[in-house]
Amino acid sequence: MGIIFMMFVIGVQLSLRELVRTSRIAIAGGLLQVVAMIAIGYAVGRAFGWSPVASYVFGAVISNSSSTVIGKVLGDRGELEGRHAQIALAWSSVQDISTVVLIAILAFLLPTERAVAPLLGKAALFFFVLLPASFWAVPWLLRRVGAMRSREFFVLSVVTLALAMASGAALLGVSLALGAFFTGIVVGESDLAHRVLGDTMPLRDAFSGIFFVSIGMLLDPAFLLEAWAPILVTVALIVAVKGALSAAIARWLGCSARLAALLGACLAQSAEFSFLMARIGIEEGALTPEVFNLLLSATVISILLAPSVNDLAPGLLRARRSGATPPDEFDETRPPALRAHAIVCGYGRVGSIVCALFERHGQPYVVVEDDLRTYEELRARGVPALLGDAGLPVVLERAHVRSAHVLVLCIPERMVLRRALEYARDVNPSLAVLARTHTYEDRDYLERHGAAEAVVGELELALELGRCALHRFGVAPEAIAASLAKTRATLR
């Protein structure tokens, strides 16, 4: 139940357009990583003396990453809108879909005759019939339910829809988590997405804490002590090897070093859906109970380590660089010498609007962007832009940070924000740093460390809605402005 609501809400929050943008990297990267990890896992399994089928199952299980864990960890960090979150969730979804094929391959390898055609046929029914049809049916249904003006019935209908679609996906051979995730994406494209999000958030919050607790309860301390060595090897394969492999593949596909490192950290865990593969293996006699417990223990440990791995990734990347960035980490061209200009870090939905305002008022600016496609579009339009990580001193230097007047940070990654702020203020104490953030805690940290203004998006949205509502009531603009100022002051 918790997984269903967590993945449903994550799907509603994500943009289908952004997921499609990441499809090239996600599809190629996800498939390459699955094949490579199966090969590595197979070799390790054979080295342990297991049968070819058991070794294949071992590789298939460790190849998968949990979109539920990715969504939970990045959601808690306020990074779901980040480029790495979009790619990681799409990448993990590709892995989940590929599991259907991996199970079909397992059916061919098993000595018993397991029906493969029905399995593939049911999965195809979900992806090519049920899912496309839901893009029309679900918004139509939500509009009809919303027209009844009953909040209780609306919430009940949304919960029923999420459970029904997830259960239907499970019956058709697709995981509950993936079914709920795709249902959320469908709902997110409807006009009522924000109402659905507001009504289901309490359910998500109630169940998300249970997720890691229930995962931890699967561990068997006695087995951990008995088989610690193979468990350690398996955890290393899932966390270190798969994380590094995913990062290397992402880098090969054109991602920046920082983006690739963040992707590797996101994917450095195993999925709850892998339990299905392992369960089939033990039911058909391909796995021994010891190997099954080994996979279960390593999967649980990797999931519990996921938050720490994501916290460590930026620091490890920074240590590897040791202050020096290889020449392919950023665009080598330097924008024309600028003085008293603005540096805009991140050209997403927020950064693009800020740049449009600068253009309208004739203010000089340069963009720092780590997404290759966005960077190329900016250069094609003649916009001064640098490709690189805004948290790197060498990139900020190429943007002429020492002579800049304003630094606008429109990036969701917390650690990159902090690194950019600290370096910029060190080399240019008079620089006005403006930052977008998601939490009051981050706002307070940034302002304590020199930011002239850190804007909490949700706070400003609430104040603007309040201003519009008071204006409708005929409240004088001066009174509204005073009230908003007082409210903003009390929230500091």
Image (cartoon, rainbow, N blue to C red):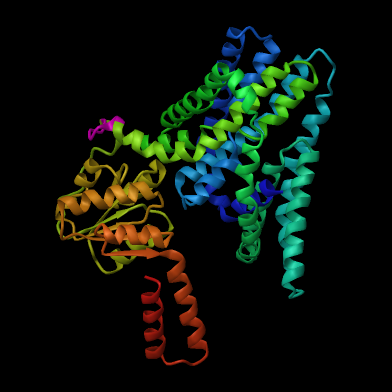
Q: Is residue 283 above or below residue 8?
A: above
| Image location (x, y in percent) of residue 423 | 22, 48
| Image location (x, y in percent) of residue 338 | 16, 54
Q: Is residue 77 above or below residue 492?
A: above
Q: Is residue 141 visible?
A: no
| Image location (x, y in percent) of residue 16 | 58, 51
Q: Residue at x 66, y 16 (%)?
A: 56
- Please tell me in which quadrant of the rendered image residue 332 appears: top left
Q: Residue at x 64, y 24 (%)?
A: 222
Q: Is residue 313 above or below residue 404?
A: above
Determine whether, in the image, residue 36 is placed left or right of residue 452.
right
Q: Residue at x 68, y 10 (%)?
A: 52
Dominant secondary structure, magenta: loop
Determine whether, in the image, residue 170 is placed left or right of residue 372.
right
Confirm whether the magenta stretch covers residue 325: yes
Asked whether 82 or 78 is in front, the reply is: 78
- Please tell me in which quadrant of the rendered image residue 348 appears: bottom left
Q: Is residue 258 above or below residue 185?
A: above
Determine whether, in the image, residue 374 is placed left or right of residue 421.
right
Determine whether, in the image, residue 308 is placed left or right of residue 130.
left
Q: Is residue 461 visible?
A: yes
Quarter of the C terminus within the rendering: bottom left
Q: Residue at x 80, y 33 (%)?
A: 121
| Image location (x, y in percent) of residue 424 | 21, 52
- Please tell me in which quadrant of the rendered image residue 114 appears: top right
Confirm whether the magenta stretch covers residue 226: no
Asked whether 149 or 265 is in front, the reply is: 265
- Residue span colored magenta: 320-326
